[in-house]
Image (tube, grey):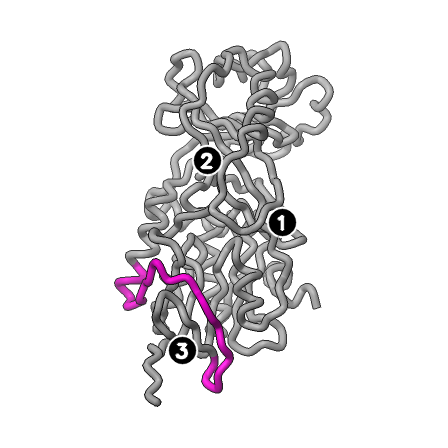
Amino acid sequence: MTDLAENTDIIIIGGGIAGAGFAAEASQSADVILLEAEEAFGYHATGRSAAMFEPNYGNEVIRYVTRASRSAFEEIGALSPRGVLMVADENRRHLMPEANSSDISELGIEDAVTLVPILNSSTAVSAVLLTSACDIDVDMVFQAYLRRARKNGAKLFNRSRVERIERIDAGWRVSAGGRDFRAPVIVNAAGAWADQVARMAGVSPFGIQPFRRSVARLPAPGGHDVKDWPMLLSVTEDWYAKPDAGKWLVSPAEEDPVEAMDAWADDMVLAEGLARYQDFVTEEVTRVESSWAGLRSFAPDRTPVVGFAPNVEGFFWLAGQGGYGVQTSPAMSVFAADLLAGRDTGFDADIIAGLSPERRT
């Protein structure tokens, strides 16, 4: 019987920011097929990102890759200054970061209220401004990846949920969306579904856990023009608020473990988060215009998993980006493509080891 499977060099499973960025880089020197289960690329975590670039956010590995990504964002004009105003009440002011660098400065509460006029100075007694934080134009970045991938000859398939993965002599056979594909390498960029994809391929799962995060869109508080306000963040990170196209987003910043799914906001969780936020502002929350939720998927050590699976030829992990997938995507995409191709990545050895799937063995 004739095998009608389409042959390629690399099959990428997952059309979010990780898969799209990797496709853009790897397709410069290899034939690439990108498979996305949903109608639209970037439907899940990428399309629901908080859209912030914060080089002080995350662990050492995340901060390293984030800072390595900045120049690529700046080159295409995807960053715009925003800043993060972190606030604490009297009982938690000891948790505030030290103002010991050029991009972290302590503010008096009067100055903080100047930046965010709705800040309740009777509750917020301590404030720190993170000046290096920027908004990211996520759609600009994501569409640039897709355009580059297509220009390089990559084939992108939406509505192509993976139904079967088989090990064959030449590598892998993947059935998705009524088509069959063959390649020596598959890249698992499936986000919340990464462990499911691994199991389908007969690879030990890494423990990638999706966590829900909800967001409410409110009218601009008190009729203020909020476009130049910084993001407002509790020092305990149990809520945040930020401008968004003339509106005001508030999130409970929850991390509730859930199954991989098309996530939706939990009304009770939203209400509790809005109550925590309400304590720090003078404008009452009277109306929620809309709400949604996304998934942030973490490995147990909260560091992405990037590299070939130990003892399984041709299975490459690119998963577990958590809430950092967008802000790390330029450098992570180049790193992953170089690593897969056996080229020098330019990353420090300890960072490579920190990302490697072998760190669990």
Magenta stretch bounds? 148-171
Q: Residue at x 39, y 47 (%)?
A: 73
Residue reaching furthest to the left: 151
Residue at 71% across / 24% down in the picture?
92
Q: CA distance from mark 3 to mark 2?
A: 37 Å
Amino acid type, residue under disc 3 in the picture: Arg
Q: Residue at x 44, y 18 (%)?
A: 287
Q: Earlier in the sequence, mark 3 or mark 2?
A: 3
Q: Which mark is residue 292?
A: 2
Which one is earlier in the sequence, the residue at label 2 or at label 1? 1
Frontmost of labels 2 and 1 is: 2
Q: Amino acid at mark 2?
A: Trp
Q: Earlier in the sequence, mark 1 or mark 3?
A: 1
Q: Return the residue nearer the eye: 198 or 163.
A: 163
Q: Nearer the viewer, residue 266 or 63?
A: 266
Apparent side of residue 4 relative to residue 332 in the rendered image (left or right): left
How far across and how far down the image is residue 5, in percent?
A: 35, 79
Q: 228 or 16: which is nearer to us? A: 16
Asked if the stretch drawn in magenta spans residue 216, the answer is no
Query: Which residue is identified by label 3?
Result: 182
| Callout 2–callout 1 Cβ contact below 8 Å | no
Residue 269: x and y in percent read 58, 30
User: Which secondary structure, mark 1?
Assistant: helix
Q: Position of residue 29 (x, y in %)?
A: 36, 72
Residue 151: say if magenta. Answer: yes
Local crowd size for mark 3, using a 10 Å CA cut-off: few (<14), some (14–19), many (≥20): many
Callout 1 amino acid: Glu
Mark 1 sits on what residue? 60
